[in-house]
Amino acid sequence: MTTKQQAITLAFTGASGAPYGLRLLECLLAADYRVYLLISSAARVVLATEQGLKLPSGTEAAKAALVEHLHCDASQLVVCGKEEWFSPVASGSAAPKQMVVCPCSAGSVAAIAHGMSDNLIERAADVVMKERGQLVLVVRETPFSTLHLENMLKLSQMGVTIMPAAPGFYHQPQSIEDLVDFMVARILDHLGVEQGLVPRWGYDSRPTV
Ligand SMILES: Cc1cc2nc3c(=O)[nH]c(=O)nc-3n(C[C@H](O)[C@H](O)[C@H](O)COP(=O)(O)O)c2cc1C
């Protein structure tokens, strides 16, 4: 695989579910992906609220804070500013072919569904769609309004994968980490990244009923 094939764009937006995004980032870096990470202003509030992780505003300082939080090798991590229009993710000539928005707010779903391209997250998603790449939105909201559902249908019909942050319970989770890993495992499966986070359906012993 070339470096470009192993690159991916990951966006954190302001939906609840920061642990999903952080765990996904950790797994992608462990799988040696070059990760272009985009973080919305609302995502920063969610990270602080849910994880106590207060990211500084500069991209290098934010990267350092993430590395400290995750205790990971981040040589392959590139944090991009929300108006960093010269970032590779902003152009079809350089952008990775895969992008995940995790967690994805209903607001970002709407903006992406309508091609707003008003910040780097929306632009990067627009680029992946126009280049016929793989876009995965890990949407979190409840309940969904008709508008949310219409936006998701529109995107799904364009080939976008709508993956609600809705972990299963059949693997008998013992902790929040088990629930998070359930979702992250399904996302990695869709991206084609090898993972062994959760036992696969039908391959492991399961309780008799
Ligand atoms: C702690 C917190 C949790 C939130 N949870 C959700 C959520 O689960 N789903 C959602 O669509 N919006 C949620 N919001 C609201 C969004 O952050 C808000 O609509 C924001 O404008 C989204 O912007 P973004 O998509 O650019 O990040 C939450 C906001 C905060 C502060």
Image: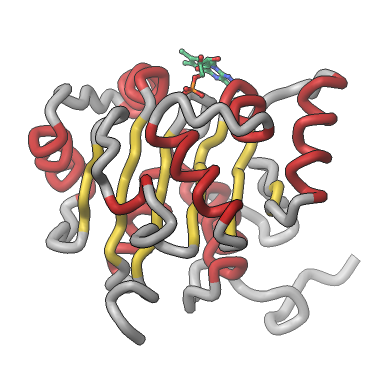
x and y, in percent, of residue 41 in the image = 35, 19
In this rendering, is residue 190 above or below 79? below
In this rendering, is residue 86 above or below 16? below
In this rendering, is residue 138 above or below 46? below
Residue 199 visible: yes
The residue shown at (40%, 27%) is: 119
Name which quarter of the figure residue 55 lies in.
Answer: top left
The residue shown at (41%, 18%) is: 42
Name which quarter of the figure residue 75 lies in.
Answer: bottom left
In the image as oriented, which residue stretches furthest toward the right? 209
In this rendering, is residue 42 above or below 182? above
The residue shown at (15%, 35%) is: 59
x and y, in percent, of residue 22 in the image = 36, 45
* For residue 187, side relative to residue 61 (left or right): right
Front position in the image: 95 or 78? 95
x and y, in percent, of residue 137 in the image = 61, 44
Residue 27 visible: no
Q: Which color scheme does this rendered protein use?
A: secondary structure
- Quadrant where the N terminus sits is bottom left
The residue shown at (34%, 66%) is: 7
Front position in the image: 73 or 112? 112
Front position in the image: 92 or 103? 92
Name which quarter of the figure residue 204 lies in.
Answer: bottom right
The total number of labels drawn is 0
x and y, in percent, of residue 185 in the image = 55, 63
* For residue 148, side relative to residue 113 (left or right): right
